[in-house]
Image: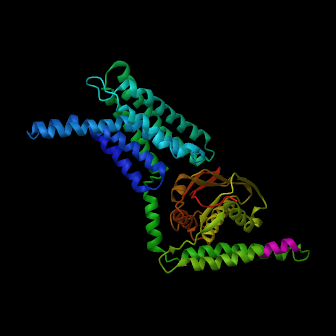
Amino acid sequence: MMFVLIGLWTIGTLLIVTDPRRTTTRWIASIAFTGGFGGLSAVLNEEISPYLLSMGWLTPALEEMINYAERVASLICYYGLPYTFIMFTAVYHPDSGGWRWRKGMAWLLLLPALLSFAFDPDVNDPIPYRMVLVWTAPFILAGIGLLVHATWKERNSYLRKLRMLTTIAAAPTMFFALFTLYVLPAVYGNSEWWRYNAWLIGFTLVVIFFSSFRYGFMGLQISIRNQRLDYTLRAITSGTSILNHAIKNDVGKIRLFSEKIKSESEKPDPEQLVHDIDVIMNASQHIYDMIYRIQGQTMDVALKEEAIVLTELIDECLAMLAPSLQNVDLIKQYRCQGAMWGDKVQLVEVFSNVLMNALEAMPQGGELQVRLSETKRNIAIEIKDSGIGMDKTQLRQAFDPFYTTKGGKKMNFGLGLSYCHTIIQKHKGSMTMHSKLGVGTSVFINFPNRKGVSNT
């Protein structure tokens, strides 16, 4: 059971170190720690004690101390595992923020575990199985139900995949543990069924390990690419290249709308003329703001946060790209106001880049979908095009600095997505892409939904 102990406590530690402030992360790390205590109990009983005995070091006092530690570790596992699991699934559910009884939920659900200490177990049993089964079974089954329901209810395809991976990692292991730790001992009186848990825990660790590399798991993202991106941007750029990229984009907008004004000069529409001039003025202001934001020669992008309504910001970006949208079927789905704290200048640059990439991927026209959804903890944006898409090699390198699939364009620096990725990370968010050659590309951007921002 040593690998169970090391594996679970390692995952728990990484989760806490990665994102200690998020409630869901703390609770799922607690599941790993309480499960690890079961492994610790087995290690003390089956490895530490026999080894000390064989070496002649196991004194009566030490033996009593180890036996006491073993019992405590066992109780933490038996009582802590169902409790931490139901608490995690409760706070992980997207609707939990609206539950009125959420504040007292942690104390209320702790009561059955505390009451279990009032009952004496049968001889040779670590816990009173029949009494404990009364509350552990509902806890675990309800937790599995909440995980499945949260996955089914999730509308964002990227977030649904993450929830599905979490369910795959947790639900089978906890369902199996329900029988090996509680049901079978209570029914058949054999408390040794827990030994079979090691195989399923191994499966869980493999799922978490794979998910961490590929998609991220509960905020844990073991990604060499992300580390390389951060160091490369700081080491080989001085801010000039990023600034050039931003200026290139805005100069392009100015040129497009200037040509539009020129072509309509014979029969000008006053309202449309004012709108087009506003776009040009906004683009020139954005150039100034970007110059102000890029500090020094170290690519240290300073954020100037303010309250932002994302629907308005995205619409502003779409308005700037209006001439390129003429042959595109634009579908917008805004399921919330999307209010958040952020740097408007930098986020305009991010969404303009992503939208421009989508439009450039559809030179003959196509369908552009912009979706915005919100939970109590996350704001999710999906920008999907029906363009040429990317193969797996291109997709893996999409966020690398100076990598571009637009080799024929002299003014393309290959810095757009790497810059966007950095800005999103500075906002404590995440940015991922899914793409298939010949089908199109989806860009998913997720921000933490911080409290204190009005959605009006």
Viewport quadrant of the C terminus:
bottom right
Classify 41 as above or below 374.
above
Of residues 177 and 301, the one nearer the viewer is 177
Task: Specify the color scheme.
Answer: rainbow
Splitting the image into 4 quarters, where does residue 56 fall? top left
What is the magenta range?
270-277
Residue 102 position (above or below residue 381): above
In this rendering, would 95 be left or right of 25?
A: right
Q: In this view, does 158 lie above or below 348?
A: above
Q: Which of 114 and 44 is in front in this view?
A: 114
Q: Seen in the image, is 268 located left or right of residue 3? A: right
Q: Name the residue located 72 percent from the left edge and 63 percent from the top edge.
A: 315
Residue 449 left/right relative to 255? left
- The answer to which image quadrant residue 112 occupies is top left
Residue 200 figure quarter: top left
Find out whether residue 6 is within the magenta segment: no
Q: Nearer the viewer, residue 234 or 181?
A: 181
Q: Where is residue 107 in the image (x, y as percent from the top left)?
A: 46, 42
State left or right for residue 109 relative to residue 34: right
The residue lying furthest to the top in this view is 188
